[in-house]
Amino acid sequence: MPAVSRAKHPEEIARRIDAIDWRRAGTDLDDHGCAVIEGMLSAPECDALAALYAQDRRFRSRVVMARHGFGRGEYKYFAYPLPALVADLRTALYPHLVPVANRWNAAMGIDVRYPATHADFIARCHDAGQLRPTPLLLEYRQGDYNCLHQDLYGEHVFPLQVAILLSAPGQDFTGGEFVLTEQRPRMQSRPEVVPLGKGDAVVFAVSQRPVQGTRGPYRVNLRHGVSRVRSGHRQTAGIIFHDAA
């Protein structure tokens, strides 16, 4: 299995991320709370990243979901230093999401604003005692699922995150759809099922986003999860931009 190296990173990754149609992604995020980015990773990059799951030295902790009522399946949080590909994605994606994050906070009346670079934001997290890295790999097998949840780990939260599907639906697994729910005031929750292919990413709201109403913007709460895997083996990478306390 090929190693996740820095042979063509970070410059190649930065060029690839810069080439994404971020205007369209921003519109999708504003309208739906999520945006799909097709082909963020190549198939070999997916395979190399997924292969890291067996290397325990790469990770700071392992969580078995059933032990905590989170669902079924498991995930591992990477330790610092992060694998090159994960670190490069975190660095390259963040500046394109900052305008959305700051615009959302302004619309929701939240005073927090985010700096232009991820390094500056991580310094803010670390100054507040949020020192543990949050990027992770998730693994599901037949019958596994992830309950609806929010990835909040401390006072400082970046309001967007990214999940990348590392397995091929219909080939490596069936079922296991990425699911978002949006809880709107005085209304029933709105579900969103997000179809992804191998190497595709979904950018989505961590916990809240503004929605334009007749009297101005209001906040809605979002949760995300994964439906039951009906067969096979599904792996995902999660890129979370804030660190954990």
Image: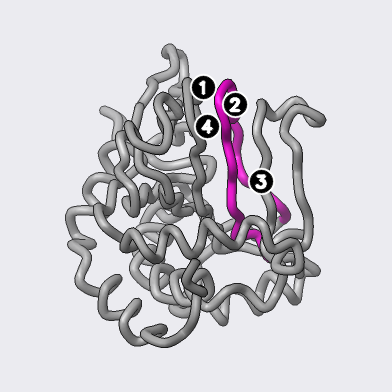
The residue pinned by badge 3 equals: 75
Where residue 228 is drawn, which disc sits there? Answer: 1
Report crowding for label 4: few under 14, some 14 to 19, many 20 or more residues within 10 A (C-alpha): many
Q: Position of residue 74 (x, y in %)?
A: 68, 40
Lower position in the chain sequence, tag 1 or tag 3: 3
Label 1–label 3 contact, CB within 8 A: no
Secondary structure at numbered mark 3: strand
Tell me the distance, in whole angstroms, between the alpha carbons under discs 3 and 2: 12 Å
Label 4–label 3 contact, CB within 8 A: no
Of circles 1 and 4, the one toward us is 1
Label 2–label 1 contact, CB within 8 A: yes
Q: Amino acid at mark 2?
A: Asp
| Residue in the picture at 41% in, 35% down | 218
Secondary structure at numbered mark 2: loop
Q: Amino acid at mark 1?
A: Arg
Lower position in the chain sequence, tag 2 or tag 1: 2
Q: Is residue 216 visible?
A: no
Report crowding for label 2: few under 14, some 14 to 19, many 20 or more residues within 10 A (C-alpha): many
Label 3–label 2 contact, CB within 8 A: no
Q: Position of residue 68 (x, y in %)?
A: 79, 31
Tell me which colouring the rendered structure shows: one colour
Lower position in the chain sequence, tag 4 or tag 3: 3
User: Depth check: 168 or 120 in front?
Assistant: 168
The magenta stretch spans residue 122: no
Report crowding for label 3: few under 14, some 14 to 19, many 20 or more residues within 10 A (C-alpha): many
The residue pinned by badge 2 equals: 144
Above or below 146: residue 126: below
| Residue in the picture at 42% in, 32% down | 173
The residue pinned by badge 4 equals: 225
